[in-house]
Image (cartoon, rainbow, N blue to C red):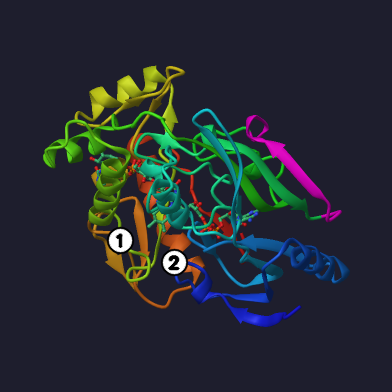
Amino acid sequence: MHVLHAEPLRPYNTLALDARAKALVRVGSDAALVEALAWAADRGLAVVPLGEGSNVVFAGDLDALVLRVDTRGIELLEERDDQVAMRVAAGENWHHLVQWSLRHGLYGLENLALIPGTVGAAPIQNIGAYGVELAPFVRRVHGVTVDRREAQSLAGSACRFGYRDSIFKGELQDQLVITSVELQLSRRSPVQADYPALASALRQRGVDQPTHQAVFDAVVDIRRSKLPDPARVPNAGSFFKNPVLPAARARELSRQFPGLPQYPQADGAVKLPAAWLIDYCGWKGHRRDGLGVHPEHALVIVNYGNNRGSALLALAAEVSRSVLDTFGISLEIEPRIYGGAR
Ligand code: FAD
Ligand code: EPU
C-alpha cells in the first residue's frame, strides 16, 4: 500500500481549494480498501472517501486518511424482458457510464449526462437533473463498513433517497465506503423530456419526437451553456440546495416578490430556486479576492485564485445571510465540508 503523507489536495477537488490530507491512498480494489481501512484504524485516523471531489469543500487541512476510490468495471448481471441489471464499480466516471449505457441501448440515465463525479458518490446525494433523479435506477448499493471492514449492501428501497439526500448523508454518514452500485436500466424506457428547460431546448432544435440520444445531446448542450467547466473555472456546481417551503409560505413570498419562480412538489410543498434568491440579492457576478459568484449562474461559487476553503465559506455565509435577511429563508450548503475548525 502506497501512503502519501501531507498530500496537497488541490488536484483532488474541483473547487481547487488549497488544503492537505494527513494521508492519502488510492484504492483500486476492495482488498486494497480493507487494507487501507485497517491502516487508518491502527492509527486512530478518521477516513474520508473521495471520488472526483466535485461536491466537497476543504475548509482546512484534513486530519484523516483520504481514500481516493479508483476502482473500475461495468458488469452485466441479468436481462429480463426489457430490464437490464448491471453492477458498476464506485470509481467509474459517472458521465462515462451514461455514455456507455446509451451506446448499449440501455436507457434512463440520459437526463443525468455530464454530472461530474464518480458512480460511488452518485447515491450519496441522489444526483438529479433535468427532471430525473438517480433513485429509481438503484437496485443495490454495495460497500465496506468503516468500523468492522465488512461487506454490507442495501437495496435501493432502503437508501431513503430524497432531494439531494439519502441514508448515506444521515444514519450511515461516514459508516460505509461504497464499492459498487447495481443499476437497473431499460431497453424501452420512455424518453423524459418534460422538464421546461429541456423541452424548450428540444423545441428550439426542431425536435418534436425526441429520442434518448436527442435528450442526452440537449442536456449536454444546456449544461455547457449554463455551468462553468470546473477544469477551467473551479467550482462545485450548485453551492446551495434549492429550499423547499410549505405552500402557504411560498404563496406569501410570491405576492411580495413577483416573478419568483415556484416549483410545486408532489407532496404539496414548493421548491424555490436558490439561484433566483441570490441573484435578486445582487450577488451574481460579484468578485473579490479571487473568489466570486459566477456571472452566468448565481448558485455557483467560484474559486478564481489560490484560496483556502475558509475564505470561500466566509463568502458563502455572506450570500446566505443576505438571502435570510431579504426572504427569511435559510439556505443549506449542498457540498460536504471537511477540515478546519467549524
Ligand atoms: P466527491 O465530491 O468526491 O464526494 C462527495 C461526497 O461523497 C463526500 O462526502 C465523499 O466522502 C462521499 N463519497 C464519494 N465517494 C464515496 C464512496 N465511494 N463511498 C462513500 N462515500 C463517498 N449534482 C447533482 O446532483 N446534479 C447536478 O446537476 C450537478 N451538477 C454539477 C455541476 C458541476 C459543474 C459540479 C462541479 C458539480 C455538480 N453536481 C451535481 C455535484 C456533483 O457532481 C455530485 O455530487 C457528484 O455525485 C459528486 O461526485 P464525486 O465523485 O466528485 O464526489
Ligand atoms: N436563475 C436565476 N439566476 C441565475 C440562475 C438561475 O434567477 O443566475 C433562475 C432561473 O431563471 C430558473 C431557476 O433559477 O428559473 C433555476 O435555475 P436552473 O434551471 O439553472 O436550475 P437550478 O435550480 O439552479 C438545479 C440543480 C442543478 C441541476 C439543475 C437542472 C439544485 C441545487 N441544483 O439547479 O444541480 O443541474 O437544477 O436540473 O437542485 C448541482 O446539484 O450541483 C446542480 C448543478
Mark 2 and mark 1: Cα distance apart in space:
11 Å
Could you tell me the amino acid type at mark 2? Leu
Can residue 154 be found in the magenta stretch? yes
Q: Position of residue 341 (x, y in %)?
A: 63, 64
Residue tagged by mark 2? 15
- Is there any visible trace of residue 31 in the rendered image? yes
Looking at the image, can residue 317 be seen?
A: no
Left or right? Give the position of 338 relative to 142.
left
- Judging depth in this view, the residue of 210 and 192 nearest the camera is 210
Residue behind label 1 places its C-beta within 8 angstroms of ligand 1: yes
- Is 289 magenta? The answer is no
Relative to the observer, which residue lies in front, 341 or 245? 245
Q: Amino acid at mark 1?
A: Pro
Question: How busy is the neighbourhood of tag 1: few (under 14 within 10 Å), some, or many (20 plus)?
Answer: many
The percent position of residue 152, horizontal first and vertical second, equals 78, 45
Quarter holding the C terminus is bottom right
Drawn side of residue 96 relative to residue 38, left or right = left
Residue 296 vertical placement versus 201 (above, below): below
Helix, strand or loop for disc 2: loop
- Residue at the image position 19 percent from the left and 38 percent from the top: 202
Label drawn at residue 228: 1
Q: Which residues are drawn in magenta?
A: 147-159
Which residue is rendered at x = 39% and y = 19% of the image?
247
**Residue shown at 23% from the left, 30% from the top:** 257
- Where on the picture, by quarter, is residue 337? bottom right
Residue at 37% in and 59% down: 301
Helix, strand, or loop for circle 1? loop
| Circle 2 Cα neighbour tier, 10 Å, few/some/many (<14 / 14–19 / ≥20) | many
- Quadrant where the N terminus is found in the figure: bottom right
Instruction: Judge depth for marks 2 and 1 and give the one in front.
Output: 1
**Residue 176 vertical position relative to residue 295 in the rendered view, above or below:** above
